[in-house]
Image (cartoon, grey):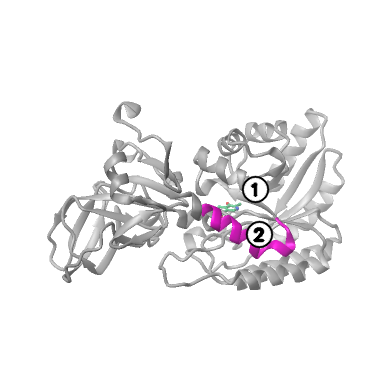
Amino acid sequence: MNYKKDEFFVEKVKSSFLAKKYSTPLYCYSFERIKDNIQSFKNTFKTINPLICFAVKANSNKILLTEISKLGLGADVVSGGELMKALKSGIKPNKIVFSGVGKTSEELKYAISKKILLINAESKSEILEIERIAKNKKKKIDIGIRINPNTDAKTLSQISTGKKENKFGISEEMTLDLIKYINSSKNLSLKCLSVHIGSQILDHRPYEKTLKVLDKILKKTKFSFEYIDLGGGMGIDYDNKNKKLNLKKYCLSIKKFLRRNKSKIIFEPGRSIIGNAGVLISKVIYIKKGSRKDFIILDAAMNDLIRPALYNAKHRIIPVKKSKIKSKKNYEFVGPICESTDKFLTTKKFQKLKEKELIIICDVGAYGMSLSSNYNVRPKPAEILIKKSKIITINKRQNLRDLM
Ligand SMILES: *Cc1c(COP(=O)(O)O)cnc(C)c1O
């Protein structure tokens, strides 16, 4: 995805052509980019040969899940719905892990009936519920314990999950007790210690701290786990400033960890697989003069992409066509929704835009469409996948009739 001459292309296709043919706002993904991301993730961690489970909540499009599955990944799911979609996309149950603090009885029964690899439990009550179901079905169920390592992931507070004040995981002391409990149960088989400290992490040190906590627990219990699930959270370069997580260092620390503890590593990356593989193409409806900046009112809104409104996240915005005119403007890019938080970005010195012109919102492949809604009774956008010069509609645009 890049400019050729002055126009933004997704693989071999002009983005203006896509906007014209499929209308806007339009989610558009590059197959090549997804493939590259997966390949480079695999290469980075080649020496530890992990099971890579794509975090379905980052993007739950069925056709994308099928493609990701064909490229060798399993799935990390956080609801019965995601589990069903992962299975329907062709992901094998023995490559699926189930996380989440509030799995209902129905969801647990469904996961058990599908014989997925692991249910990562996040509380004593959940462990007791799994045991109760297992006893009823006269089964022995493989489970993991998700710990809360009390480490600060140094990311946006809204997407941090590994501190003791967060609802996720089980404390170190409690984990030690529960390991004993599970090992004495006839219906539970403890297979995994899991952890996920948050999302959009760009500093490798929180990961290293987490490994230390895992080390400590493993030393204390002396129980050897078949799997250690390190979660996801690897950050991407939203600012386009080449700020990258040092995955080499992370990998080295994991290798050291594995010398002391022989387990199979599981990863649950979402954002780092799909984030930079998607763009949102949008059209300028109106330009409204303000005192210090002009408002660029787009046809995309917070219902299509909520990350800026929800987390104060920044997504770069770039023009579909670079203009030769030198004049620059201060703009605020906003949507049409009746909320003041319905704004994407305030920028200085953007090229002068005209009404009906097209722009690109970058890096929306993760937590874009999956977090979209019908707020303001707005139909959800279409999604397309570009594979070389082939254009595949992977999700039709909703129409108003769908919403009535
Ligand atoms: C959200 C989530 C992930 C994925 O996080 P990314 O930042 O997208 O890599 C992985 N594991 C669990 C348990 C999650 O909740």
Q: Counting residues from the N terminus, which is met first, the one under dot 2 or under dot 1?
A: 1
- SS at circle 1: loop
Residue at 51%, 49% in the rendered image: 58
Quarter the C terminus occupies:
top left
- SS at circle 2: loop
Quarter of the image holding residue 204?
bottom right
Residue in front for this viewpoint, 54 or 228: 54
Ligand 1 is within 8 Å of the C-beta of the residue at disc 1: no
| Residue on which the image places disc 1 | 72
Above or below, 270 against 185 in this view is below
Image coordinates of residue 18 in percent, x first then y, are 32, 45
Residue at 52%, 63% in the rendered image: 235
Q: Which mark is residue 148?
A: 2
Labelled pair 2, 1 in contact (Cβ < 8 Å): no
Q: Quadrant of ligand 1?
A: bottom right
Task: Provide the residue span drawn in magenta.
Answer: 34-50
Above or below, 224 against 119 in this view is below
Which amino acid, mark 2?
Asn
Image coordinates of residue 87 in percent, x first then y, are 62, 35
Above or below, 34 against 21 in this view is below
Residue at 59%, 63% in the rendered image: 163
Whether the magenta-drawn stretch holds residue 10 is answered as no
- How packed is label 2: few (under 14 Cα within 10 Å), some, or many (20 or more)? many
